[in-house]
Image: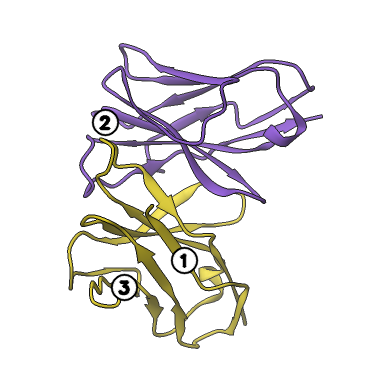
Chain colours: A yellow, B purple
């Protein structure tokens, strides 16, 4: 079945460091790919998405490119801030069984230190 | 603010009891999803409704049930509660059922079973 694999956390960075969180997926069809962020005590917020191969999603300085050849959707940011500290979830939606449910990775905790 | 509302925010109850979680989707969204977030299982899809009809079931226990009403709000009923049901329950909504749809999440209901 479909699945998402994320790099284990926690990831601890200093402010202004470069961030990469790896995400790879397995899917039988043509999924859409998403990054969601969960701040402490809050729900999930969409960070960015890409719906077809080679699409680049971007938002708030974060970017991720849908790579079909490597089945990857790695999240990057050039310069992180303390306010970026949160849990980041990679997810896919694949139209199988008449549902566009989301399948999530395990989440990666990012801690940014001043 | 995603536009998705969930009540209550917190729920504390005892084993064997029954509770109802409520969700109001964003205006205009016809699809409602329920997800469970726990430390051991991560984020898991439970069930989806579309325009009042059940669309798909995921890892939902038989003790759990849900429905979507004509005004499109949804309720998740959890009965014969066990300690292991303690988790964060999220509701999400989207316009339809296509894989490119973004799902918008509510703030969640934290259920504690004592």
Query: Percent from the top left, x then y, of residue B54?
Result: 34, 22
**At numbered mark 3, what does the secondary structure look like: helix, strand or loop?**
strand
Q: Are marks 3 and 2 on the same chain?
A: no
Vertical relation: A3 (above or below) A41? below
Viewer-side residue, B37 vs A45: B37
Instruction: Give how far across and how far down residue A113 sits, in percent.
Output: 63, 80
Count neighbours of disc 2 (C-alpha within 10 A) and say few if under 14, some if 14 to 19, many if 20 or more.
some
Q: Pinpoint the chain carrying mark 2.
A: B
Residue appearing at x 67%, y 15% in the figure: B18
How far across and how far down the image is residue A69, in percent? Answer: 23, 77
Q: Name the element at disc 2.
A: loop
Q: Which residue is mark 2?
A: B29
Return the x and y of residue B92 as percentages of the image width and height: 40, 37
Gap between marks 2 and 1, in whole Å? 29 Å
Please, what secondary structure does the residue beneath circle 1 have? strand
Q: CA distance from mark 1 to mark 3?
A: 15 Å
């Amino acid at each position: 079945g479909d699945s998402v694999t994320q790099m284990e956390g926690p990831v601890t960075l200093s402010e202004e460091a470069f961030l990469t969180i790896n995400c790879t997926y397995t899917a039988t069809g043509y999924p859409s790919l998403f990054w969601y962020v969960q701040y402490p005590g809050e729900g999930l917020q969409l960070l960015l998405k890409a719906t077809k191969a080679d699409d680049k999603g971007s938002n708030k300085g974060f970017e991720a490119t849908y790579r079909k050849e490597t089945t990857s959707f790695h999240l990057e940011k050039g310069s992180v801030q303390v306010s970026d500290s949160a849990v980041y979830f990679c997810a896919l939606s694949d139209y199988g069984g008449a549902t566009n449910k989301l399948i999530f990775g395990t989440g990666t905790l990012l801690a940014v230190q001043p | 603010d995603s536009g998705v509302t969930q009540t209550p925010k917190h729920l504390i109850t005892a084993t064997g009891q029954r509770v109802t979680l409520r969700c109001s989707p964003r205006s205009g969204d016809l699809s409602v999803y329920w997800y469970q977030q726990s430390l051991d299982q991560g984020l898991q899809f439970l069930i989806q409704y579309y325009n009042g009809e059940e669309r798909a079931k995921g890892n939902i226990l038989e003790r759990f049930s849900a429905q979507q009403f004509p005004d499109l709000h949804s309720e998740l009923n959890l009965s014969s509660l066990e300690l292991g049901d303690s988790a964060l329950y999220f509701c999400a909504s989207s316009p339809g059922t296509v894989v490119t749809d973004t799902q918008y999440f509510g703030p969640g209901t934290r259920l504690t079973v004592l």
